[in-house]
Amino acid sequence: MRIPISVLMCVYNGDNNNWLDISILSVLSQTYGNISFIIVDDASIDKTPQVLQKYAKRDSRIKIITLKKNIGLTKALNHGLNYCDGENIARQDADDISHPQRLEKQYSLIEKDNPIGVVGCFYDIIDAEGTKKENKSILPESVPLSKMNGIFAGGSAMIRWEVIQELDGYNEEMKYAQDFDMWVRASKKGWKIESIPEVLYYWRNHRDQISSKTIDGQQKCRWDIINKYKL
């Protein structure tokens, strides 16, 4: 018997400016509490393991998966999926913040309409200090599938477990843009992509994040997806 929601977080060397603490606490303080919280430590070499163990001792909903070698985000996500026991998988990036009602509102929507496979939400871009820089408020139906990569933050997505099974998880050929690839494949299978028209996620933009360091690789993967699926 699966529980309603598993939250999946992957982290590598996340012990930076208390961002990991803030991110974890934003999940633990959700108004919807019937969750499991799977955190994959992708062979961190800083104090991330100690931070994770601190919270695992406090809250039995947390399960820490420690990898012996660094395998990258896409493979780490798939590895973490093996430990998820939720009917829906909510992503959470280790440097971002979820609004307290994020899971409650996404779960309410995805449970009402079976054809919905992925639910995101509006989000604010914040800087390293947590100050708002920009707002992203775009509904999926307002953009073509080729531009779906920017519709909502990857870490803000809730994905139906049935979709993940049908797609066989994340495409490990995609080192980057793995969320965009999954949303496109889900859409091609007939699943609806929806977004809560409220700011329920805060995406931290900083120089050490993957998207900042690998912008060229991100763009190449995006164009590979567009060409592959003829979007």
Image (spheres, helix red, strand yellow):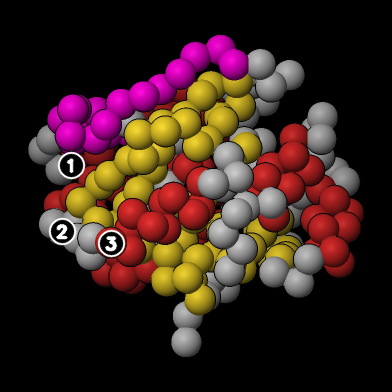
Residue at which label 3 appears: 112
Q: CA distance from mark 2 to mark 1?
A: 15 Å
Of the numbered discs 2 and 3, the one sitting upstream in the chain is 3
Q: For residue 79: magenta?
A: no
Q: Nearer the viewer, residue 105 or 213?
A: 105
Lateral position of residue 11 relative to residue 152, left or right: right
The quarter of the picture where residue 36 lies is bottom right
Residue reaching furthest bottom?
1
The quarter of the picture where residue 146 lies is top left
Q: CA distance from mark 2 to mark 3?
A: 19 Å
The quarter of the picture where residue 112 lies is bottom left
Q: Amino acid at mark 3?
A: Lys
Q: Amino acid at mark 2?
A: Lys
Rendered location of residue 168, percent (x, y): 33, 67
- Mark 2 vs mark 3: in front: 3
Magenta range is 132-149
Residue 85 appears anywhere in the view? yes
Rendered location of residue 92, percent (x, y): 56, 47
Residue at which label 2 appears: 189
Disc 1 crowd, CA 10 A, few/some/many (<14, 14-19, 20+): few
Rendered location of residue 23, percent (x, y): 69, 42
Q: Secondary structure at mark 1?
A: helix
Quarter of the rendering occupied by the C terminus: top left
Q: CA distance from mark 1 to mark 3?
A: 32 Å
Disc 2 crowd, CA 10 A, few/some/many (<14, 14-19, 20+): few
Name the residue located 51 percent from the left edge and 76 percent from the top edge: 3
Q: Secondary structure at mark 2?
A: loop
- Mark 2 vs mark 1: in front: 2
Marking on residue 228: 1
Q: Amino acid at mark 1?
A: Lys
Rendered location of residue 182, percent (x, y): 32, 50
Q: Is residue 213 above or below residue 63?
A: above
